[in-house]
Image (cartoon, rainbow, N blue to C red):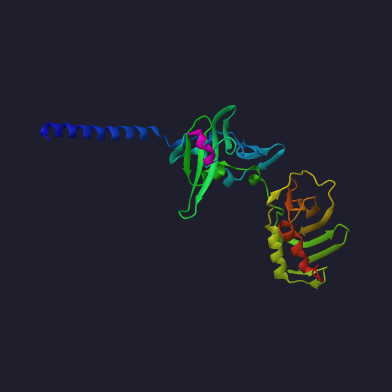
Amino acid sequence: MNNRKLIIIFIACLALLFAGKFFRGKRTASFDPVIVAFDTTSLDRIQFISGGPVKEEFDLKRIGTTWEARQGELKATVDSNALRAILGPLAHLNAKRVVTSETAKYPEYEIDDAQASKLVVWQGNKKLAELMIGGFRFDQEARTASTYVRKADKPDVYLIDGFAGIGLKARFDQFRDKKIFKAEVTDLTSIEWMNATGSKQTIVKDDGAWYYAGMEAVDTTAFENYLSGLVNAKGSTFSDLTSTQGLPLAEKLTLSGNTMTEPTILSVYHQQDSISPFLIHSTANPEALFTSDSVGLYKRIFTDLRQFWPDGQ
C-alpha cells in the first residue's frame, strides 16, 4: 500500500473520530439535568393526586407564613420537616439520566397514567409544573434509592437519585395529627377506666406513688412505663367515619392531671370490621378517629392497663 493511500485512510479515521466526539458532545449538551427549579417562596399551592385505581387528591396551601394540607373538609397544619421534604426537591430537582422516551415502556417504570402519582405546582391561578411520579426502587446492596419522574407534557422519563420522590408522592394522612394524648407522664395524677355497663376502676397518684382505688399500691415503675407508652402512642390508620354516632361504646379512659385544664378522655367503640374492630377517639385530638385491631393501639391503651387491676382482668 503506497503512502498516498495510507494518508487518505489516516485522514478518514481522524474525520470519523472527530465526528464521533462532536455528536457525542452534542447529545450530552442536549441533556438538561434540571427537571424543575423554583423559588419556593413564590409557590402557594401544591396539588397531589395519587396513582392507582382509586385516586386520592389533596392540596397543600400556603396560609400566611404556614402551610395547610386540605382534603375536602379535613385540614391539617404541615410541620416544617414534612414541608421541607416537598419544597426541597421542588427548589432544584435534578435527574441523573433519561431512562426512556418510549411510551410503551412507561408501565415498566410505573410512570404511565394508570400507575403514576401526579403533582401540580401553582402560583395563584397559574400552573407552573405538572410532574408524574413513578416507581421507587431501593438497591439494598448499594444502599441507594431511585425514583422515576417525567413532565406530564414531555415523553422523557428521568431517573432521580435519592429519596426526593418519596416526598413528591405524599399522602394526606401523613400530615394529620396522630397523637392521642398531649401532656407528659409527670402531669398525670389519676386514671379512671369505665366499661359499657358503667363499671369503673381507678388508679391515683399520691406522694409520687400510684395506688389502685386510692388504697392498694401498684408497681409504680411498671405503671409509669405503661403511661409512657400511652402518652407517646400514635394512631396509624385513620377511619373514614366522621362520627361515632350509633356505635356501641366499649370502654372509656379518663386521664386527669394537675397541669391539665381538663381531663383527656379516650373512648373506644366497636365497629363492624373483622380486621380492625375498634374505633378510638381522643378529646385531645377530637377531629381524628383511629382504627385498631386487638394488638395495636387498642392494646397499648386498654388491654395493657388491665395488668394493674387486682385480678389482672
Residue 109 point in image, percent of width and height? 52, 41
Is residue 183 placed above or below 68 in the rendered structure? below
In this image, 100 relative to 267: left or right?
left
- The residue positioned 51% from the left and 41% from the top of the image is 148
Residue at (30, 32) in percent of width and height: 22
The chief SS type of the magenta part is: helix
Q: Quadrant of residue 171?
A: top right
Which residue ends up furthest to the top in the rendered image? 125
- Residue at image location 71% in from the left, 62% down from the top: 227
Instruction: Specify whether residue 101 is painted magenta.
Output: no
Q: Is residue 207 visible?
A: no
Q: Which of 137 and 312 is in front in this view?
A: 137
Is residue 102 rendered to the left or right of residue 26? right
Residue 281 is situated, as x and y percent measured from the top left of the image, at 76, 51
Please say if 114 is above or below 207: above
Residue 66 horizontal/vertical position (percent): 61, 40
Q: What stretch is highlighted in magenta?
A: 102-109
48 vs 181: above or below: above
Q: Residue at x 54, y 43 (%)?
A: 135
Q: Is residue 261 left or right of residue 101?
A: right
Residue found at the far front of this picture: 1
Q: In which quarter of the image is residue 295?
A: bottom right
How many numbered marks are there?
0
Residue nearest the observer in this picture, 12 or 217: 12
Q: Quadrant of the N terminus?
A: top left
> Among all residues in the image, which is located at the extreme right?
197
